[in-house]
Image (cartoon, rainbow, N blue to C red):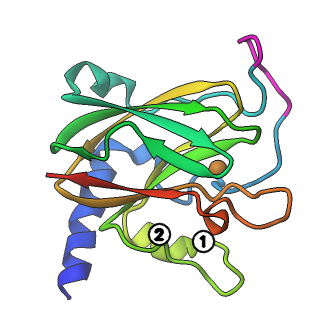
Amino acid sequence: MIELRKVGIGRVLVGVVAVAIAWGTTGCGDDAPTESSATTTGASGRPCEPVGAELAAGATDRIDVELADYVINLDHAATRAGAVTFVAHNIGTEDHEVAFLPGGGPVPTVPGGEPDEAALEAAGAFELEAFGPGRTCDATFVLEPGTYTLFCVVHAPDGRTHLAHGMHATLTVT
Ligand SMILES: [Cu+2]
């Protein structure tokens, strides 16, 4: 019950600050690359769709996030509660996203390894949508204290998710 209550709080928070990118509303995890609309030299794949730009001016921390095939590296993995800007750099060769699971721990999956969309939605998961190699994309979220699992469930060429290839990290918010 305690876990459920925590998740409920996270969901309310997300509902306030990140309605537009709530889990399950955007076809997250779709692996089909869209036609490139790159305007930056060397960039490809999906364009960046920034999140929370209106919150960025009030951010109290900036975390640089490197997205590689298939690793998420945070330049620091602990921060304070409040508005936090994530500057995500896709240095890999595939599209990558940054999804957040409030409460931390393993990302729920269904048999076969696909993300459990219903469980993620119930947990208040939210995300910076996938964007292509060579791109940098910003997302600002208001974070409550707690642990968050950051992960990517874009599909690799082998059909498995990037998460299944180990693409996840942990962020601690105090
Ligand atoms: Cu990825």
Q: Residue at x 31, y 47 (%)?
A: 77
Which residue is denoted by mark 2 in the rendering? 120
Tell me the quarter of the picture where residue 121 sits.
Answer: bottom left
Q: Nearer the viewer, residue 140 or 70?
A: 70
Q: Relative to residue 76, is residue 42 drawn left or right? A: right
Q: Nearer the viewer, residue 115 or 8?
A: 115
In terms of image quadrants, where is residue 75?
A: top left
Q: Amino acid at mark 2?
A: Leu
In contact (CB < 8 Å): disc 2 and disc 1? yes
In the rendered image, residue 28, in percent from the top left (x then y), is placed at 63, 54
Please give the residue where the numbered disc 1 appears in the rendered image: 115
Give the residues drawn in magenta, as a range: 35-42
Residue depicted at 59% across the width and 63% down the height: 166
140 within the magenta span: no
Question: Can you say whether 111 is above or below 40 in the image?
Answer: below
Question: Which residue is found at the position 57% from the left and 78% from the top?
Answer: 109
SS at mark 2? helix
Question: Which x, y percent locates residue 148?
Answer: 33, 59
Q: Is residue 75 positioned above or below 112 on the image?
A: above
Disc marking residue 145: none
Residue nearest the viewer, comparing 143 with 136: 136
Q: Quadrant of the N terminus?
A: bottom left
Q: Tell me where residue 33 appears, x and y as whole percent.
A: 82, 42
Give the prevailing secondary structure in the magenta stretch.
Answer: loop
Indicate if the residue with disc 2 has its beta carbon within 8 Å of ligand 1.
no
As shown in the figure, which amino acid type bears the numbered disc 1? Pro
Query: Is 79 on the left-hand or right-hand side of 38?
Result: left
In space, the residues marked 2 and 1 are separated at their CA atoms by 8 Å
